[in-house]
Amino acid sequence: MPGTLAAILSIVFMAVSIYLGSHFLVEPETSSLKRMTLEFYESVYSKSQNHSEKDAVGFGYTGCKDIKVNTFDFLDKLDIPFIPHEKTHIVTVQDFVQTFASFFTAGASSEIFMQSKENFELLLSKMEGFPNVTTFGGNAPHMALRAAHENFNAVLIADIGQEEAQIIKALDANSRIRFALVDEVRTSSDVHLIFEYPATEYKGLKSPKGNKFYLNHDTISPQLRALDK
């Protein structure tokens, strides 16, 4: 009898599971972030190819100039002992190197604010002459461009410089991005220094995996000037 009861309960459980699955569960692919994102766009924008300005969505608030050089060549030029020591506040160039070493040995990513404007500019000056990759950065410009490429209008709220604005305009083939600070585009942007590294060894220390370390001295984006527009 117990065995018969268990068998009956198993059949009932399976039947209920099948019923619930067919009526209430959604296929993994259709319940993905992509589906939700598309539904969001469709709920906000008209399906017409000629959206009005009121259909546009704003992306902000940070935009910047990204500069990336060869991390280890640059550290060699700084010639500061590569000793892991994470600092709560990064003020000096040594603070940066030791904090970077700490994240390097953990294979961890980070974005850290350097408190000293003078020392941040010193690092920038030491990058002169190094082969580098310089482009616009920040989530807002990239998201605005993605929306534009999907044929939606966008308002870029990020407070960026003229150089970065021109690059974004060149990539915006159908001119769907409007700049919230169009009359006040700065001559310069906040700068983010990118130190990328693979899983490797450097000066006797090993990184278990590759990652990126961002260093900034942002003074423009935190002002949120576009909020008044």
Image (tube, rainbow, N blue to C red):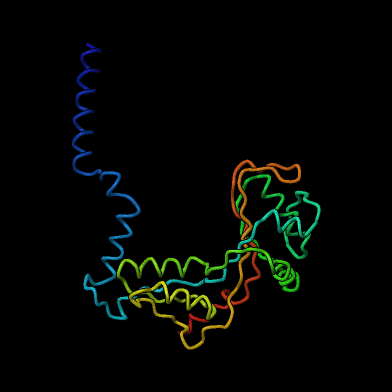
Residue 97 in the figure: left or right of residue 20: right
Residue 175 lies, in percent from the top left, at: 35, 78
The reply, left or right, for residue 143 in relation to residue 161 is: left
- Corner quadrant of residue 46: bottom left
For the N terminus, the image quarter is top left
At horizontal 53% and vertical 78% (from top left) the residue drawn is 163
Q: Residue at x 31, y 57 (%)?
A: 36
Name the foreground residue: 59 vs 169: 169
Q: Is residue 189 left or right of residue 14?
A: right
Compare residues 135 and 131 and report the one nearer the observer. 131
Write the residue at 75% across / 73% down: 118
Point out residue 179 in the picture as x, y percentages from the top left corner: 43, 80
Quarter the C terminus occupies: bottom left
Judging depth in this view, the residue of 27 and 183 nearest the camera is 183
Of all residues, the one furthest to the bottom in this rendering is: 183
The percent position of residue 29, horizontal first and vertical second, equals 29, 46
Q: Please tell me which residue lies in front, 156 or 33.
A: 156
Q: Position of residue 131 (x, y in %)?
A: 64, 63
Q: Is residue 179 above or below residue 23?
A: below
Residue at 24% in and 12% down: 3
